[in-house]
Image (cartoon, helix red, strand yellow):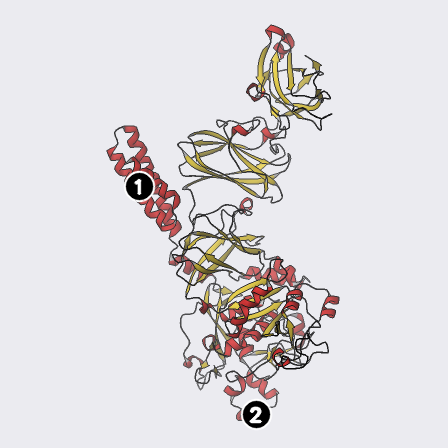
């Protein structure tokens, strides 16, 4: 039986998820049987107690593993409201009858508030329906086929541009996605209602009502709009228009639906990857072109065939630029451009790049005025780009062919939106994320974490998508209205990334050992591409930096070539205890080399029986290096730490958070010391101790913290003077401790100084030692050396004499400078150093 119990415990330490739950239940049953068969009462008691612990652990696993559908439904429902509007999850396609207008029915009017920017408001001339716009252009409605006039036929070319709207990312995205919306994939047919499937184009709605299916806040959602568009009292346009057909309506209605969920026509902008994720549901990926590790050859090989097959939509964006840089380069700063085509001729690779502005700057670098394929047949083929003023190309007046190298040099990001049908398998989970207390924000302990594995392995894409919420929108608009650039405003929303650990699907607490780390982005989406090993269980962690709001909701989507198992990651250990503390003016003792090390916050850890231990120390000040030691201190306050005293250490001092882990700790009482690198560094912290058995953690009273500090005169020990003493007195009974350390550079070379501190009464054969440092051993003074506590009894000290004695070995002839000090409850008096 004992062998079976050990095997069950060993297996439990290796498995996770449902396997861990099943193993815990089986192990509990084994312990129950073992208790019944036990030969002694103590053995039976031990087995019953372990059985109860395993049952409790199994219940915890059930809670962590079971993400009830009602919880996910609640997340999706809670994310359905934005800007006072309700956007329900998509449940069915509308019927054509939903858009018919009865004899007495009035045209549908959407009561949502579409705000305008100050510039837009200056020219605003009211909301007008398509019929009014046609009449303004001189059309007679009785002669117009509204279906044909307002909705172009399949594959008819269009040139989408923006004017005084601020949504360049939306228009660039729509412009780049025209082919997938109306071409082979015909995405528009599943997005836009009503739709004429026979003619492959949207239908005119007599009711003036349109329903757009958009993908945001965790699912496909229903967005209902009317057909009124904001008009201008000038020749400027307040919505996206097609220069090939200014009456074309579906792009303007898609734009309106999108802007309804993003807060209005004064929407300060986003990025095209996010916009197309919402508009099309295609997987967004952001490639940072200015990173050193970017391989443009790899980028080209991954996008060329996919673009030719219409399985990827490409847009590119610039970063922050000065007006002078914009004038010279002909590129607008913080602006998204659409990629209308790709071509490769004579080894040169070209992108047809279009500025979505109606009138605006055009790329002034190396470019071509015609399709590179036509130049391959010309006498000048292969001699590089032309240099005269660009002209219209491929029916786009703002588009020019730009080399891949120039794109990589002059643009900051490439946004790729991939066809999700490239992946046979897809699954999603929806969850809330409440920001942890300040001291845990830099750690990962409270972050969303999921165990992911595949029996067959292979390619897996993981997309984290942050749901839109009104509070973020207010931050974004507030910052841009005060003159901030879009990049500066976006930074106010914080950054996020995906980390992946090879940790068997168990929860992790800190960064440092991840096998994959994505870039930290200010976008609401971030994508991780993984090639996972068959059968291996990974832990996927969502990380954040400077998220400003107290809570968020998210969706994690997994796209894969083979089936993938995904469930919430579970803690590596079944029990956890937490303490909140602080390094204050009195308790920030610094590292072990500081004489005030003893005043650091310390905790008694009581372990009832052998268990693995994990100690997480995390602070609310990410600039302070911190450290944790578990030492053989018998649960008492320690004054100094030697290597042999340490059970486990968190390693080098590290900013923000550290972990100390021991694979097995014997039963007993231990001391945990929490320290900053420098004395006096103040911050709050949290201490979390995880274990496989219940342990207790309690603060050790700071009996030395806050004591009076009496610095002593510096002294020197050398080959000729190896021992010195200093008399000490007090007027009343006083608890005291003494400390010494090397005071600076040695006066010469050679020697390896070791010292010992003693506190003695009397002299000669009557001398009595009250306290000695290091259990009597000589120690290296580069780390502060302390005596245990001792009492100064005034009468005895005056009668017999009381001295602090410092003696050394391994000294060179020029001497070593030392500094010493006393820490006491009450004032003490000292004399001068003297030879012994």
Question: How packed is label 1: few (under 14 Cα within 10 Å), some, or many (20 or more)?
Answer: many
Depth check: 137 or 430 in front? 430
Question: How packed is label 2: few (under 14 Cα within 10 Å), some, or many (20 or more)?
Answer: few
Depth check: 243 or 367 in front? 367
Residue at disc 1, secondary structure: helix
Residue 23, position as x, y percentages in the image:
33, 45
In the picture of the structure, the residue carrying the numbered disc 2 is: 140
Residue 290: give its label.
none
Q: Could you tell me how many numbered marks the image carries?
A: 2
Splitting the image into 4 quarters, where does residue 272 fall? bottom right
Q: Is residue 390 above or below residue 322?
A: below
Q: Is residue 444 above or below residue 32?
A: below
In this orientation, does residue 801 appear?
Answer: yes
Q: Find the residue positioned furthest to the left.
A: 37
Residue 732, position as x, y percentages in the image:
62, 15
Instruction: Give the residue displayed 33% in from the left and 35% down from the top.
Output: 49
Q: CA distance from mark 2 to mark 1?
A: 83 Å
Depth check: 522 or 141 in front? 522
Q: Is residue 755 above or below residue 226?
A: above
Of the 4 image quadrants, the one containing the C terminus is top right
- Determine whether, in the image, residue 226 is placed left or right of residue 325: left
Residue 473, position as x, y percentages in the image:
58, 62
Q: Is residue 363 above or below residue 686?
A: below
- Determine whether, in the image, residue 758 is placed left or right of residue 312: right
In the picture of the structure, the residue carrying the numbered disc 1 is: 28
Instruction: Give the residue displayed 53% in from the left and 52% down from the top.
Output: 543
Splitting the image into 4 quarters, where does residue 291 fall? bottom right
Q: Find the residue positioned furthest to the front.
A: 379
Q: Sequence-wise, which precedes: disc 2 or disc 1?
A: 1
Depth check: 619 or 107 in front? 619
Residue at disc 2, secondary structure: loop
Residue 467, position as x, y percentages in the image:
51, 61
């Amino acid at each position: 039986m004992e062998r079976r119990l050990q095997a069950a415990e060993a297996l439990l330490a290796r498995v996770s998820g449902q396997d861990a739950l099943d193993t815990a239940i089986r192990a509990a049953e084994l312990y129950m049987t073992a208790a019944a068969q036990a030969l002694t009462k103590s053995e039976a008691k031990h087995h019953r107690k372990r059985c109860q612990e395993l049952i409790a652990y199994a219940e915890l696993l059930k809670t962590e593993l079971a993400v009830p559908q009602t919880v996910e439904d609640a997340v999706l429902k809670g994310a359905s409201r934005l800007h006072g509007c309700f956007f329900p999850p998509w449940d069915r396609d509308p019927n054509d009858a939903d858009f018919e207008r009865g004899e007495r029915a009035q045209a549908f009017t959407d009561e949502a508030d579409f705000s305008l920017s100050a510039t837009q408001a200056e020219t605003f001339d009211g909301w007008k329906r398509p019929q009014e716009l046609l009449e303004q252009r001189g059309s007679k409605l009785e002669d117009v086929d509204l279906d044909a006039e307002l909705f172009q036929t399949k594959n008819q070319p269009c040139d989408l541009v923006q004017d005084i709207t601020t949504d360049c990312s939306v228009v660039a995205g729509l412009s780049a996605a025209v082919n997938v919306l109306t071409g082979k994939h015909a995405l528009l047919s599943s997005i836009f209602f009503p739709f004429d499937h026979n003619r492959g184009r949207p239908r005119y709605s007599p009711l003036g009502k349109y329903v757009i299916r958009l993908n945001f806040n965790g699912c496909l959602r229903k967005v209902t709009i009317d057909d009124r568009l904001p008009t201008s009292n000038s020749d400027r346009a307040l919505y996206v228009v097609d220069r090939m057909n200014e009456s074309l309506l579906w792009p303007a209605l898609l734009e309106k639906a999108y802007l309804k969920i993003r807060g209005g026509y004064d929407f300060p902008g986003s990025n095209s990857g996010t916009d197309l994720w919402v508009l099309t549901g295609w997987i967004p990926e952001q490639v940072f072109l200015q990173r050193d590790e970017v391989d443009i050859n790899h980028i080209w090989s991954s996008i060329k065939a996919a673009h030719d097959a219409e399985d990827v939509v490409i847009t590119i964006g610039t970063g922050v630029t000065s007006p002078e840089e914009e004038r010279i380069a002909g590129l607008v700063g913080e602006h998204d451009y659409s990629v209308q085509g790709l071509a490769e001729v004579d080894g040169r690779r070209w992108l047809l790049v279009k500025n979505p502005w109606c009138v605006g700057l055009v790329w002034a670098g190396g470019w071509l005025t015609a399709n590179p394929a036509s130049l391959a047949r010309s006498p000048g083929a292969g001699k590089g780009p032309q240099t005269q003023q660009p002209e219209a190309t491929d029916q786009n007046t703002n588009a020019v062919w730009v080399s891949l190298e120039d794109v990589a040099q002059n643009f900051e990001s490439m946004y790729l939106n991939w066809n999700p049908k490239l992946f046979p398998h897809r699954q999603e989970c929806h969850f809330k994320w409440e920001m942890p207390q300040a001291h845990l924000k830099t750690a990962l302990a409270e972050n969303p974490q999921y165990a992911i594995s595949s029996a067959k392995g292979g390619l897996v894409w993981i997309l984290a998508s942050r749901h839109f919420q009104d509070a973020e929108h207010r931050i974004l608009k507030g910052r841009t209205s005060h003159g901030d650039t879009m990049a500066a405003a976006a930074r106010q929303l914080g950054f996020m990334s995906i980390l992946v650990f090879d940790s068997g699907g168990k929860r992790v607490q800190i960064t440092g050992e991840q096998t994959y780390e994505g870039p930290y982005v200010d976008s609401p989406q971030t994508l991780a591409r993984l090639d996972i090993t068959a059968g291996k269980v990974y832990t996927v962690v969502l990380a954040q930096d400077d998220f400003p709001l107290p809570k968020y909701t998210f969706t994690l989507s997994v796209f894969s070539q083979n089936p993938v198992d995904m469930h919430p990651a579970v803690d590596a250990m079944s029990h956890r205890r937490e303490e909140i503390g602080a390094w204050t003016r009195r308790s920030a003792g610094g590292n072990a080399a500081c004489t005030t090390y003893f005043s650091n916050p310390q905790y008694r850890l009581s372990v009832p029986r052998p268990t693995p231990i994990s100690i997480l120390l995390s602070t609310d000040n990410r600039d302070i290096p911190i450290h944790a030691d578990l030492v053989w201190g018998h649960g008492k306050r320690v004054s100094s730490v030697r290597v042999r005293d340490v059970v486990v250490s968190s390693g080098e001092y590290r900013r923000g958070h550290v972990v100390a882990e021991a694979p097995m700790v014997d039963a007993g009482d231990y001391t945990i010391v929490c320290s900053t690198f420098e004395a006096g560094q103040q911050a709050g912290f949290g201490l979390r101790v995880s274990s496989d058995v219940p342990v207790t953690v309690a603060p050790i009273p700071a009996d030395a913290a806050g004591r009076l500090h009496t610095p002593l005169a510096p002294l020197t020990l050398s080959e000729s003077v190896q021992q010195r003493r200093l008399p000490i007195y007090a007027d009343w009974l006083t608890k005291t401790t003494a400390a010494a350390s090397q005071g600076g550079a040695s006066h010469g070379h050679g020697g390896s100084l070791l010292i010992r501190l003693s506190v003695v009464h009397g002299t000669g054969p009557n001398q009595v030692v009250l306290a000695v440092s290091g259990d009597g051993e000589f120690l290296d003074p580069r780390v502060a050396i302390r005596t245990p506590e001792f009492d100064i009894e005034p009468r005895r000290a005056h009668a017999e004499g009381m001295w602090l004695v410092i003696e050394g070995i391994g000294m060179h002839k020029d001497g070593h400078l030392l500094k010493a000090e006393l820490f006491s409850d009450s004032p003490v008096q000292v004399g001068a150093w003297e030879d012994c």
